[in-house]
Image: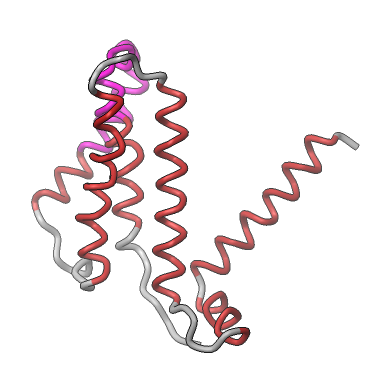
Amino acid sequence: MDKNLIQRTLSGIVYVAVIILCTTPLGAHLINSISPGLVKQEYLYYGLITFLMSVGSWECFKIMKFGKGYERFVVFPLVIFIFFVFSKRYFHFDFFFDFRISEILALVLIIIAVVTLFKYPNELYFDSGKLIFTVIYVALPFSFALGLPKFLQL
């Protein structure tokens, strides 16, 4: 059997287990049965999204291969700022039934990023295009993902 297949299978099983534990009430229940009152389901989900956004931003930064310009220093502070703005809304339960024009425009930006990726790939050769693409393609979707869940109790 191929060693790469075994490694990918095992990492896929771990990935699915972490996703299930962090996105369902079962995960918080299992962790709290080991150590009562340790963590709420909302914090597990937030930690998962924060971790995935951080890894996704770092990977996108490495793949884009930024030059020596200022853009490589602006990427992570900008991603953190956008995620922080959405995190405030997450912890104040401000996502539900309250769409703002800025959020609608941000969703349009995600569509524009996808169109740019496939229709105008030459734009990604410039560092400014890489910066904008990284922020729109990584930070905004993970920030919007904070508004997806409705948490239940077991």
Secondary structure mostly seen in magenta is helix
The quadrant holding residue 15 is: bottom right
Which residue is pictured at 14% across the width and 65% down the height? 98
Q: x, y percentage for residue 18? A: 59, 61
Which residue is pictured at 44% across the width and 40% down the height? 56
Q: Is residue 136 left or right of residue 3?
A: left
Is residue 8 shown above or below 148? above
Residue nearest the viewer, comparing 39 with 134:
39
**Colour scheme in use:** secondary structure
Q: x, y percentage for residue 63? A: 46, 24
Which residue is pictured at 32% across the width and 10% down the height? 122
The quadrant holding residue 94 is: bottom left
Part of the protein shown in magenta: 109-133
Q: Residue furthest right?
A: 1
Q: x, y percentage for residue 112? A: 24, 30
Which residue is pictured at 24% across the width and 31% down the height? 74
